[in-house]
Structure formats: C-alpha cells, structure tokens
Amino acid sequence: MLCLSVLAPACDDTKPAAKAATAETKVDAELADAKAADEAKAADEAKAADAAKAADEAKAADEAKAADETKAADAAKAADAAKAADEAKAADDAKAADAKAADAKAAEKPSNPKPNMKKPDTTKPDDAKAEPASTVDGKALYGKKCKNCHNDNGDGKTKIGAENDIEDWNVAGWKTKWTQQKIEEIVLNGKSGSKMKPFKDKLTADEIVAVSKYARSLGK
C-alpha cells in the first residue's frame, strides 16, 4: 500500500499536457485577434485612402469644370467685343457712305430746275462783274438773306459764321473753287452738312441768279 501511494502521483502526467494545450489555444486566439485587428485596420486605411482619392478626383473635376466655364466665358466676352467692334465699324462705314452720297447729290446739277432758271453762259468768262446787270437787285437780296451769316464782305466773320465755321470768301482762290453755277445750285438746294437751307421755295429763279452773282463778286 505504501508503494502504491507513493508511485501514483509520479505516474500521472495528464495535467501538464492539458495545461500546455490550454496555453497554446490562448496564444492561437491572441494571434487570431491580432490578425483580425490588423485586417480591420488595413480595411479602414484602404477605405480612407479610397475616400481621399475620390475627394481628390471630385476636386480635380470641379477645378476642370470651373476652368472650362472661365474659358467659355472669356471666349464669349471676346466674341461679344468683336461683334460690337464690327457693328461699330459697319455703322461708321454706313454713316461715311451716307455723307459721301449726300455730298455727291449736293454737287450734282439739279434734275428739275425751275423753268425760268437762268443757266450760266459757259462761252464767256465766269465773272459776275463782266455780265450785264440783272433787273433784280442782288446786293439788296444779299443784305436781306445772306449777310447775317456771311457778313457784308463775305468773310463769314459773324456770330453765326463763327458758330458754324462758315468759309471766308476773301481767301485767294475762292472764286476758282466756287463757280457761278455751283453757287446757284447751293442757293437753290442748300448745302449738305451745313446750316445753309435751300431757297428754291423762297426766291425766284432770277433772284437766285442775282444774289449768287453778287455773293461771288465779293470773293477773290
């Protein structure tokens, strides 16, 4: 009996093995937990990276859209400016063409002069002083109708003349530039681009000839 009681503990080795198995199981569990934690962390980091990438892509897309909108706005502004410049040029060209046409029309010989309108004698020198005196007093007519603007001597130095830049007839060469016929046409139809109004409904044909001759006689 003594032998059995002493040997029995020495022969029982099941407890250490069980203890070792428990420790191994615990280590495996800890390793599994650590692995799961690492995987979860990696998943969170990957998710965060994807979110950051998506945010960067969205920001880049917004910046590209803004750049395109700015470029389109600049192009539209440039197109509007070019269109406005073209329209302004076209308006200026049309205005210049109208002015040129008006000047050309004023320079043309009247297509419907009054029946009694006397035409200048082109076979003689265009000198009013050398022609026979008219029955109409051209000087008197000039005093009533013309001197307020052109002055007594035709130099245009009057208040109205200064305001409208009326030409000085006393300048040398004026007669060469302004023929008798041309003056009669201006008195008849007025002068385009000036305050000179037509007298065709205010004076007779003889009166227009007479006042035109006297006016030209004042020039040089």
Image (cartoon, rainbow, N blue to C red):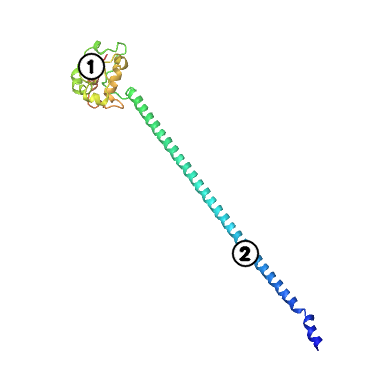
- In this rendering, position of residue 42 left or right of residue 116: right
Residue at 35% x, 28% y: name it: 99
Question: From the image, which quarter does the C terminus lie in?
Answer: top left
Seen from the viewer's position, the closer of residues 198 and 10 is: 10
Which amino acid is tagged 1?
Tyr
Q: Position of residue 52 (x, y in %)?
A: 56, 56
Q: At numbered mark 1, what does the secondary structure look like: helix, strand or loop?
A: helix
- Can you give x and y, in whole percent of width and height, for residue 69 in the image? 49, 47
Up-down relation of residue 214 to residue 6 (above or below): above
Seen from the viewer's position, the closer of residues 215 and 149 is 149
> CA separation, marks 1 and 2?
116 Å
The residue indicated by pointer 2 is 40
Q: Which mark is residue 141?
A: none
Crowding around mark 2 (Cα neighbors within 10 Å: few <14, some 14 to 19, many 20+) is: few
Q: Classify 10 Å Cα crowding around label 1: few (below 14), some (14-19), many (20 and above).
A: some
Q: In the displayed image of the protein, which residue is found farthest to the bottom?
A: 1
Quarter of the image for residue 172 reads top left
- Where is mark 1, residue-wise? 214
Q: Residue at x 76, y 79 (%)?
A: 14
Specify whether residue 114 is in view.
no
Residue at (52%, 49%) from the top-left corner? 63
Residue 209: give x, y in percent of width and height. 25, 19
For the view shown, which residue lies furthest in the front direction?
Answer: 2
Q: Residue at x 66, y 69 (%)?
A: 30
Closer to us: mark 1 or mark 2? 2
Q: Quadrant of residue 163?
A: top left
**Picture coordinates of residue 89, whole percent (x, y):** 41, 33
Q: State the residue in front, 20 or 200.
A: 20
Q: Quadrant of the N terminus?
A: bottom right
